[in-house]
Amino acid sequence: MPRTTPAASDLPDVPVVELLVRLASGSLTAVELAEAHLERIAQLDDSLGAFLLVDRDGALRAAQDIDRRRRNGRPVGMLAGLPVALKDVVCTRGLPTTCASRMLERFVPPYDAYVVERLRAADAVVLGKVNMDEFAMGSSTENSAFRPTRNPWNREHSPGGSSGGSAAAVAARFAPLAIGSDTGGSIRQPAAFCGVVGLKPTYGRVSRYGLVAFASSLDQIGPLARDVKSTALLLESIAGHDPRDSTSLDADVPPYSRNCEEPVRGLRIGFARAHFGDGLDGDVESAVRRALDVYRSQGAQLVEIELPHAKYAVAAYYLIAPSEASSNLARFDGVHYGHRAERFENLVDMFAATRGEALGDEVKRRIMLGTYALSAGYYDAYYLKALKVRRLIRQDFDRALERVDAIASPVAPRPAFRLGELVNDPLAMYLEDLYTLSANLAGLPGISIPAGFSSAGLPIGLQLLAPPLEEERLLRVARMHERETDWHERRPEL
Amino acid sequence: MSAPLAREEVVRVARLARLKLSDAELERFAGQLGDVLGYVQILGEIDTTDVEPMAHAVERTNVFRSDAVQPSLGREQALANAPKSDGRCFLVPPILDAG
């Protein structure tokens, strides 16, 4: 627990709720808070590799402006003074946005992503850009073209991915809040591996304007933080309708951060036998069962549900996501932005040489897989078949969620694996995503919350899924677990 | 382990995808793509007769906006990240013979 009057260097440990109180009262300035985090990053991030870019000047400038306005009694935003780390897949005007790819190593966006506009309007202080798997393709952050990120709980292990930099930054107290993106589990799995909270909103809840596209029908931006309430606060500040994303939903944004404190009466939690099958690590299974007991002890009813198509999610996903990726990444051709090869024979050869030398293995593999699945003669058997199975997966959830308020499951089949353990076996890596992919295929909101530790001391997460646009319910259910446990208060020693 | 994808298939797909691959990459991808394509055959177990494909989680079509001029990126900004430009246009290698 934080001391009552921490020195500046202890500020990164103070919960967001308390930081907001201190900032509002004037006993803490945004500059002091930014400096405490920047100092911690400077001291410790060499050994983790969470940040790709630290914008010290920009952060301090924003913090000074917030402090000045507050001193003068002028209005400030709902996140005023809170530092935030951004996954390097969201465009930041004037700040390089690399997607952890050689292709975009020198790309400086001319505009801010919608979420960045919203964060700036809420007076969050952007500390910099954090590491990820190249173009968000991967589950370990080892596919970054620049460096892998290490897990703050054990540096030999992966922080998960693709938002590994975001999760590691929050766990390491480099930033109290972080933005990630989740196409198949890329917020929830790293949150679980690093012992923090991560939420993938309903598809369309948060605008994708300015998010570099991977698989457009699955991509969603979301928050990571150390506790449920600050996750809710960050979601509240970035959710909402944006006409520049035609898939953005025009639905009211509830005051998530206030309402999450209200327990759900008569709660019914669903669990599926399919989620407790072969290959599930014993420590993870125990943690999930213990979490179910926490709900039972609060009077919740546990209901067994059927998800008959759950076992097909990995196969459907790894046809649909690469198909969309192969189309989206066609834009990286060395013409409008990004890398261009120096040696080539003609225009088409310039495209191929540029892409061949500036894209990493996993990105090439997915482009190839998607191109194959969409090519003449294979489209029906692969892509179209996968889209039909996608509907069956969605129907499974629709039926199950008529009977329960939320579905609980593991986030990943085991705690964080070792760096290097899976990176040379793509199919084995894909199979690790089996619990998280379905929410993206179905468009449902999902959250990962801290639920324990393995015997080796690595964090374990619990996943909760709810019907579309029921983020508020998800956060309330998550908070019911958090209130009864203290997993989220543990911190890694760096 | 499934059978690797035939080398000529990998070459065909790389050409469609505009990816110049080394021999080592062609060989590696042949094996890895073969693994994944072998695995996804499990979808064949499911009867999907009369199931409509689901391309999107939010099934809406035709989101309209008024046909009004909006501010957009200026030329200088649009060209700022170009690998090659003359300040007016993006430059690419010639696509027609000079003669």
Image (cartoon, coloured by chain):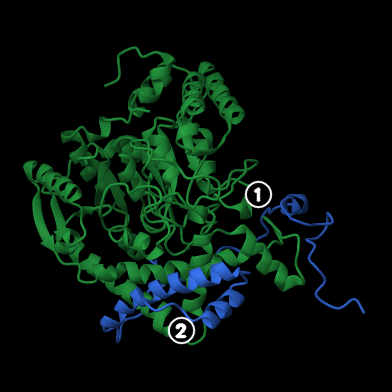
Chain colours: A green, B blue
Residue at the image point whose x is 18% and y is 34% from the top: A485
Residue B94: which numbered mark, if any?
none
Chain ID at mark 2: A
Check contact, mark 1 vs mark 2: CB within 8 A: no
Mark 1 highlights which residue? A107
Mark 2 highlights which residue? A378
Would you say residue A312 is visible in this rendering? Answer: yes
Secondary structure under the numbered disc 1 in the rendered image: loop
Residue at the image point whose x is 42% and y is 40% from the top: A150
Picture coordinates of residue B19 (x, y %)?
A: 61, 69
Secondary structure under the numbered disc 2 in the rendered image: loop
Mark 1: few, some, or many residues within 10 Å (few <14, many ≥20)? many
Residue at the image point whose x is 52% and y is 53% from the top: A211
Picture coordinates of residue A348 (x, y %)?
A: 71, 73
Q: Quadrant of the N terminus of chain A?
A: top left
Picture coordinates of residue A364 (x, y %)?
A: 53, 65
> Is B3 or A385 nearer to us in this picture?
B3
